[in-house]
Image (cartoon, rainbow, N blue to C red):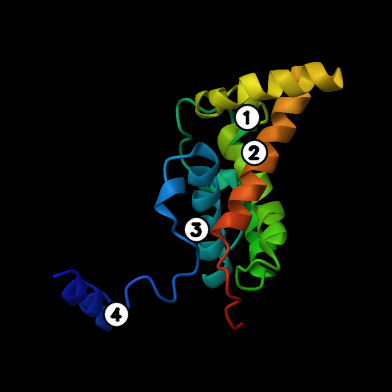
Amino acid sequence: MKEENDALIEKLNLGRDVPIDMNPRNWKKPEFLVARWLYFMLELFRKAPMPPEIKPEQFDEMPLEMKLDQFYERARSHNESRKRAQKLRPFSRKNYREWFEASWPMFESQFTKEFQDQKCFEKFRPIAEKIAAKEQKKIRGVLRRYIKNRILFAFKALAPKVDLPD
């Protein structure tokens, strides 16, 4: 039975030519969830034709929970990430850092400037507290750096191990 399944999967070509490494061990980790979302948003921005910039004046009404300055900031951040995405080469181990940096404005607008306080990143706090005590630095900065590094690592882990052609 296993041989038949393996043969069928081989014929279907499942899992081949996937633009990112889809290791199931990482699917539920918050940094991988964030990195996958950012990757797919950048890929959409990269492949789609460049639409006009988002302008808050285009909308008749704003989301109720959002203030005007938050709305302008989110539009600016998405436009910045969209412009950066247009210049990216296909995602690979050689340029995962460029993809990460292009996505950062969008990350900050989605998770707010105080992203370290988000519930999804709570599990990183004890580790960051130990690092902060060791380095004699403030917990906020160490936690932000740690989260940022974890997301960068997730981008690297998502990058295909074989470079795809442009």
Callout 2 touching callout 1 (CB < 8 Å): yes
Local crowd size for mark 4, using a 10 Å CA cut-off: few (<14), some (14–19), many (≥20):
few
Q: Identity of the amino acid at label 2?
A: Glu
Residue at point 67%, 53% (across, down)? 100
State the residue position of label 2.
108
Q: Which mark is residue 43?
A: none
Q: Which mark is residue 115?
A: 1
Q: Is residue 49 visible?
A: no
The first of marks 2 and 3 along the sequence is 3
| x and y percentages locating residue 95 in the rendered image | 70, 66
Q: Specify the quadrant of the image occupied by residue 134.
A: top right
The first of marks 4 and 1 along the sequence is 4
Q: CA distance from mark 3 to mark 4?
A: 26 Å
Q: CA distance from mark 2 to mark 3?
A: 16 Å
Q: Identity of the amino acid at label 1?
A: Phe
Residue 88 vs 107, above or below: the answer is below
State the residue position of label 3.
40
Q: How many marks?
A: 4
Q: Specify the quadrant of the image occupied by residue 22.
A: bottom left
Local crowd size for mark 2, using a 10 Å CA cut-off: few (<14), some (14–19), many (≥20):
some
Front one among 37 and 23: 23
| x and y percentages locating residue 137 in the rendered image | 84, 19
Q: Quadrant of the C terminus?
A: bottom right
State the residue position of label 4.
10
Q: CA distance from mark 4 to mark 1?
A: 42 Å
Residue at point 61%, 76% (across, down)? 163
The first of marks 1 and 3 along the sequence is 3
